[in-house]
Image: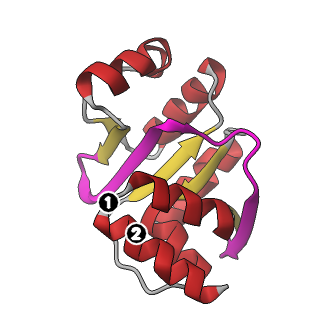
Amino acid sequence: MTFLERLCESLNHANVGYVIVGGYAVALHGAIRGTLDIDIALQWSKKNLKKAESALNRIGLESRLPITAEDVFNYRYEYIRNRNLMTWNFHNPADLSERLDVIINFDARGKKLAYKKISGISIPILNINDLIQMKKSSGRPQDIEDAKALKNLK
């Protein structure tokens, strides 16, 4: 089972409101894109963040920073404004190729999703139009290129 499959299976089992964004979402929509980590966005609530943290810990992922879901929820705006922290990073100390970023400046609540089935596991990805908008709004060169590639798929 791939890291993506284990991740989504764990999050789905815990009933976490989440969506795959970033390079994996671009690739799952069909654009050629290499990436080293998986990016997810959560439906923003303390309960959902805690469920996500537990689900991630169950598959061996640990926060790279000494913060918890409660910290991220309570201090989100401070982290974004004063520390320029846009992602809550996780890694697997037993397999450093397993890396995940939780995007903290994006709320997945109410977003349109697309679903891909891989090995029987339902994988929610941000729909192509919202993903293009998310990529454009970041302004990073790679994200602008991703937005162009996604637009060409439409």
Residue in the picture at 57% in, 76% down: 28
77 is higher (above) or lower (below) than 154: above
Residue at image position (41%, 14%) is 75
Is residue 139 at all visible to an observer of this figure? yes
- Expressed as whole percent of the image width and height from the top left, the position of residue 110 reads 77, 42
Badge 1 marks a residue whose secondary structure is: loop
Asked whether residue 1 appears in the rendered view, the answer is no
Q: Residues within 10 Å of mark 2 (few under 14, many from 20)?
A: some
The reply to whether the magenta stretch includes residue 108 is yes
Span highlighted in magenta in the image: 92-118
Q: Which residue is mark 2?
A: 144
Q: Amino acid at mark 2?
A: Ile
Marks 1 and 2: CB-CB under 8 Å? yes
Please give the label number shown on residue 140.
1
Q: Secondary structure at mark 2?
A: helix
Q: Within the magenta stretch, is there residue 26?
A: no
Please state the horizontal and vertical placement of residue 10, each as a whole percent of the image.
Answer: 59, 48
Asked whether 59 or 41 is in front, the reply is: 41
Answer left or right for 97 relative to 7.
Answer: left
Whole-number angstrom distance, CA of label 1 to CA of label 2: 6 Å
